[in-house]
Structures are given as C-alpha cells and as structure tokens.
Image (tube, rainbow, N blue to C red):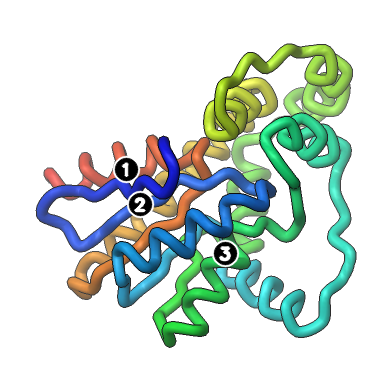
Amino acid sequence: MKGNDVISIDGLNIHFIDVVRGLKSEAGRVFRAVDKVEPETIAMSISNGEIDGLRDYVKEPFEVEMSRYEELYASRLSKFGDVFLPPPCFLAGLEAAEKGQLELIGIDMDDETHSAAYCAHVSGRDLFLHSIRLNFIKMKNFKAGSPRDFAIKWDRAVNNLRGFRLLESERERFMTDELKGLLKSKKRILAIIDAERAGNVRKFLLRELRK
C-alpha cells in the first residue's frame, strides 16, 4: 500500500485501511483515512476490552509490558521508523472517533472467546515449539521492502505452527462476522485492520456476502 491508501469494496459502505501495529507513522495514515472516508463507524481489529484499555492509557499513561517476541518485533520494525506501544494506529482510531463523535467498535474476540479458541487449537506441542523458536526468529532475515511486507512475513514466521494458524484463522472469521453484522446497519464504516489479517478478512467477507 502507498501513503494513505484506502481499500473500498464496490457497492458496500465499508472501507479498509491496513495498518502495521507499533509503527508511529501509522497514526497519520489513520487520520487521513478518516478524513477521506468520513465514516459513521470505525471498526478496529482489537476487542472492545482493548479499546477500554486504550481509553485508560490516554487518561493516565502507563508502561506497556512486551513479550520476548514483541520486543524482537519492535526491534525489527524500527528499521521502518519509530515504534511505540500501545499501537499508534489504534490510538489514532480512538482519538478520531472521540473527536468526531463516531461510533467505535472492536471487532476482535474478547478475552473469554479468545481463550476458548486458544485452548481448542493450540496444543502443548505447539506451545513448546513456539517457546523454543525465538532464537530461530532472531536469526531470520526478513527481506521486506515496506513495513506492511515485514508485518506479513513476521506473522507467517511466528504463527506457522498449525495450532497458531488455526487460531489466527478463527480470529479472521470472527472479525468477518462482526463486520458483516455492522454492514446491516448501512452505515459508512472504516475498518482499521492489522495488515497480516486484513487480506483474509476481506476475502472471507466477500465470500460471505455472495452467499
């Protein structure tokens, strides 16, 4: 994607912007997308509980702890610019929604739903292999010409174990169902979706709407 590209689906009141978590410059892309689309609803690929957490952070900033994988991700992503947590793309979505008095909805799984999906798909073997693969990821050369390409390649490397792939696929289908429900209201929607999930979400959404 270039600059502030917005992906629209013909005949539907939904527009997408694929974002890279953590990259500071993504905030500007989100603000420009909001100005371009003039949505009534902003949907983000985090849960409503995480949106509440962002609101708490804005009121009283606190240190965000990162896992070892997240620390390595941030280190590699910094090649493309400053990195910050919580993700600037979602902080910008929250700010734009509040300034414009727009509806803001988290379309990802809540903690309970995610935990159930995690237990259903991720085996003990997956967990063990995931825990010992960090050194391999550290040595991996991610040849990416853009932050979006990097985010996608990172996701493929980190979530290539079967259980984690199934979990991420279920997340994508969950977000698809949430967007499908929002479309029934006929409101103009801007969907702010992680780059690594966005392609499948759009594919699943189009497939569902053709049924």
The reply to whether the C-beta atoms of the residues labelled 3 and 2 are less than 8 Å apart is: no
Residue 74 lies, in percent from the top left, at: 78, 39
Q: Earlier in the sequence, mark 3 or mark 1?
A: 3
- Which of the two marks, 3 or 2, is nearer to us in this view? 2
Q: Residues within 10 Å of mark 3 (few under 14, many from 20)?
A: some
Query: Which residue does the numbered mark 2 point to in the structure image?
Result: 16
Task: Look at the numbered disc 1 and give the secondary structure of its residue.
Answer: helix
Q: Earlier in the sequence, mark 3 or mark 2?
A: 2
Task: Identify whether 197 is placed above or below 174.
Answer: above
Q: Residues within 10 Å of mark 1 (few under 14, many from 20)?
A: many
Real-space Cα distance between discs 1 and 2? 9 Å
Question: Count of labels shown?
Answer: 3
Please name the residue shown 61% across and 71% down the image.
51
Real-space Cα distance between discs 3 and 2? 17 Å
Q: Is residue 26 left or right of residue 31?
A: right
Residue 1 lies, in percent from the top left, at: 41, 36
Q: Amino acid at mark 3?
A: Ser
The reply to whether the C-beta atoms of the residues labelled 1 and 2 are less than 8 Å apart is: yes
Where residue 132 is drawn, which disc sits there? Answer: none
Q: Residues within 10 Å of mark 2 (few under 14, many from 20)?
A: many
Where residue 47 is drawn, which disc sits there? Answer: 3
In the image, 197 versus 40, the foreground residue is: 40
Where residue 202 is drawn, which disc sits there? Answer: 1
Task: Look at the numbered disc 3 and give the secondary structure of its residue.
Answer: loop
Q: Is residue 36 left or right of residue 111?
A: left
- Which of the two marks, 1 or 2, is nearer to us in this view? 2
Q: Amino acid at mark 2?
A: Phe
Please name the residue shown 43% across and 87% down the image.
101
Q: Amino acid at mark 1?
A: Arg
Residue 38 lies, in percent from the top left, at: 30, 71
Q: To which quarter of the image does residue 114 belong? A: bottom right
Task: Identify whether 209 is placed above or below 187.
Answer: above
